[in-house]
Amino acid sequence: MNSNKKIFYGWWIVVGAFFLNFAGIGIIMNSMGIFIKPVSESLGFTRGGFTLYFTIAALSMMVMAPVMGKLLERYDIRLIMTICTTVMSVSFALFSQCRTLRQFYILALFLGIGSAGSHIIPVSMMITNWFVEKRGIAMGIVFAATGVGGLIFNPLADWIILHYSWQAAYLTFGLVIGVLSIPTAIFIVRSKPADKGLLPYGSEEALKQQSLDEQGGLTAAEALRSRAFWLLAVIILLIAIANMGILHHIVPYLTDMGFSSTTAATLMSLHMTMLIFGKILVGDLADRLGLMKSYVFCMIGLMISIALLYGSQLMWVAIVFNLLFGFSIAVRTVLPPLMTARVLGQKQFAVIYGFLNIFTTLGTAVGVPLSGFIYDATKSYHMAFALYIVLCFIATAAGIAVLKRKE
């Protein structure tokens, strides 16, 4: 067993994980905002009521997250992921046939189940297993795919909706998810290097350090009783609420401010472009500067970017917001799995991160409709923005506390 072949298979895992995040998160999570106005206006839904389907999908994903963590460790990852990616793509495509909120809500249950075993948990598990050295940059690359997806699919969805219909956009994207995700699950993914007769990427010294620091980590039962686990849970929950509460309402907010839907989608694409570079850069910074400095740097940028929304009726402010928010929000996806491996170890990483992913999806479930309901009640998003700045400040303090324990 060695990891010194010309092309280490772990980099093919990175490619496969990139496709999974590109389709699963890039479409389902990062392009949802484009659908809010056209679907709500077409079918007579309130924004809060319509975005509640995303909450249901997130809650479904939350319930299934720890189950998927156990299944992915116990059974063939290709089998589990093939089933999940199929369920995910079919559910999303069938949104094109919905005419009532109840129909959206029912399909959202299946979308959440499929998503739980298609991207965040298995991707984080594979990168953590396959890499000791370059783990940060590998994690950054695979989660940069979500920005690439948003960059491509937001303007594409806007174009399809304007020229055809929102139904055509849902159907098209469901097919894209299936074409990219299902073959990847069947032919590329592998749970760990031993499945290919390899060792993780890294020197013997790094592997020895990994064995001491991570493989000797906590079991899932021990983690659930630890203070560090619950600090990580708070961090993940609060950042997810703030991120999702803003992300899916950027386009509606900008159009409310007087921008055309095309301009708003273009600005959203700018955000997604920065997200691509931000995730790669944050992963590299984590390798070079350490998790503490990288985390604090991102959180300060995130709070400043949210504050900029109050002046985003000015084009230059809207541009700066999208650039800074796109970079800083990399903290939501790239750093949590790295922090989990550092603080709690790798002994049962998939199970532990499955439990932590409950708080990711809970934050998603709360954030998206929360902004919608605040808008419905006040006809403004300003109260929501203030709330999210406060939540980010609390998450920053919690992150400093948990990472100091490992320094």
Image (cartoon, helix red, strand yellow):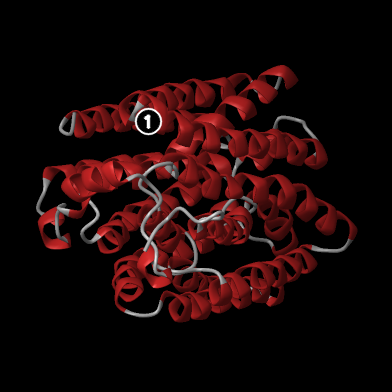
- In the picture provided, is 170 more to the left or to the right than 186? right
* Residue drawn at 49 percent across, 37 percent down: 330
Q: Is 330 placed left or right of 272 in the picture?
A: left
Q: Which residue lies furthest to the right in this view?
A: 163
Q: Which residue is drawn at 66% across and 67% down?
A: 180
**As rendered, which of 89 and 375 lies closer to the eye?**
89
Relative height, residue 328 to residue 184 (above, below): above
The x and y percentages for residue 74 are 29, 77
Quarter holding the N terminus is bottom left
306 w.r.t. 372: above or below: above
Name the amino acid type tagged 1.
Cys
Figure quadrant of residue 176: bottom right
- How far from the left and from the top, in percent, is residue 354? 31, 61
Instruction: Pick whichever, 108 or 339, lies toward us.
Output: 339
Q: In which quarter of the image is residue 292?
A: top left
- Whether residue 387 is visible here, answered yes or no, is no
Question: Mark 1 Cα within 10 Å, few/some/many (few <14, many 20+)?
Answer: many
The residue under the point 29% across, 42% down is 206
Front-lying residue, 120 or 12:
12
Is residue 277 shown above or below 142? above
Left or right of residue 202: residue 245? right
User: Is residue 38 found left or right of 17 in the rendered image?
Assistant: right
Q: Where is residue 38 in the image (x, y as percent from the top left)?
A: 74, 55
Name the residue tied to disc 1: 392
- The quadrant in which residue 294 appears is top left
- Image quadrant for the C terminus? top left
Q: Is mark 1 on a helix, strand or loop?
A: helix
